[in-house]
Image (cartoon, rainbow, N blue to C red):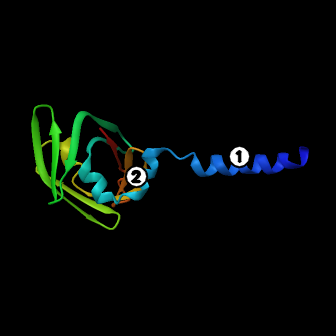
Amino acid sequence: MKKHLPAKFLFLFISIALFSCTPDYQDLAKENISELLIKNQWNVQVINANTSYNYKDFTLGFDQRGLAVFNMNQSQVFGSWNLVDKNISLMLNATEVSVKQLNRTWNITSQKAGSIHFTCSDPSTGDQLVLTKK
């Protein structure tokens, strides 16, 4: 009986290692970024050296034709988006400075369960963008 004990522990370890992924993470890994952006509404957060601005109760949506919609309070700001490789360019037609700071090219740095993390393509800013599924 004791000589089978190490084999049982090995089997248990392999089973846990292979089957312990969360369903959200598995889904995110299988989808491409464009499909993921289009099928969800996103909460927005921008982080930089001076501030961390959370666009509380604001959402950002994307469609397959390249339209981006930023929903803020009772109004919407329209614009465009384009994804090439791991870079997304946003251009929102806004006058508000806080919304205009989203108008950049962002490099995708990581994709986690329920969120996508970006850094600004201009490294001198140090800005980061986090989109979290609503």
Q: Which residue is mark 2?
A: 28
Residue positioned 25% across, 49% down in the render: 39
Label 1's element? helix
* Mark 2 Cα shell of 10 Å, populated few (<14), some (14-19), many (≥20): some
Q: CA distance from mark 2 to mark 1?
A: 27 Å
| Residue 110 seen | no
Residue that protrudes farthest toward the bottom in the picture = 85
Q: Nearer the viewer, residue 71 or 21?
A: 21
Left or right, 118 with respect to 1, comes to left
**Helix, strand or loop at disc 2?**
helix
Q: Nearer the viewer, mark 2 or mark 1?
A: 1
The N terminus: image quadrant: top right
Task: Tell whether label 1 touches label 2 (CB within 8 Å).
Answer: no
Depth check, front residue: 134 or 50: 134
The residue carrying mark 1 is 12
Which amino acid, by three-letter code, is at mark 2?
Answer: Leu
Label 2 or label 1, whichever comes before in sequence order:
1
Percent position (x, y) of residue 6?
83, 49
Locate residue 86 relative to residue 63 in the image: left or right.
right
- Name the side, left or right, on which 87 lies relative to 14: left
Indicate which disc residue 83 carries: none
Answer whether residue 67 is visible to the viewer in this image: yes
Q: Label 1 amino acid? A: Leu
Q: Nearer the viewer, residue 36 or 129?
A: 36
Image position, residue 32 (x, y; %): 34, 60
- For the C terminus, the quadrant is top left
Q: Residues within 10 Å of mark 1 (few under 14, many from 20)?
A: few
Along the line of sight, which residue is nearer the eye, 122 or 113?
113
Spot occupied by residue 27 in the image (x, y as percentages of width and height): 41, 51
Q: Residue at x 36, y 41 (%)?
A: 50
Image coordinates of residue 106 in percent, x first then y, are: 31, 57
Residue at 84 percent across and 45 percent down: it is 5
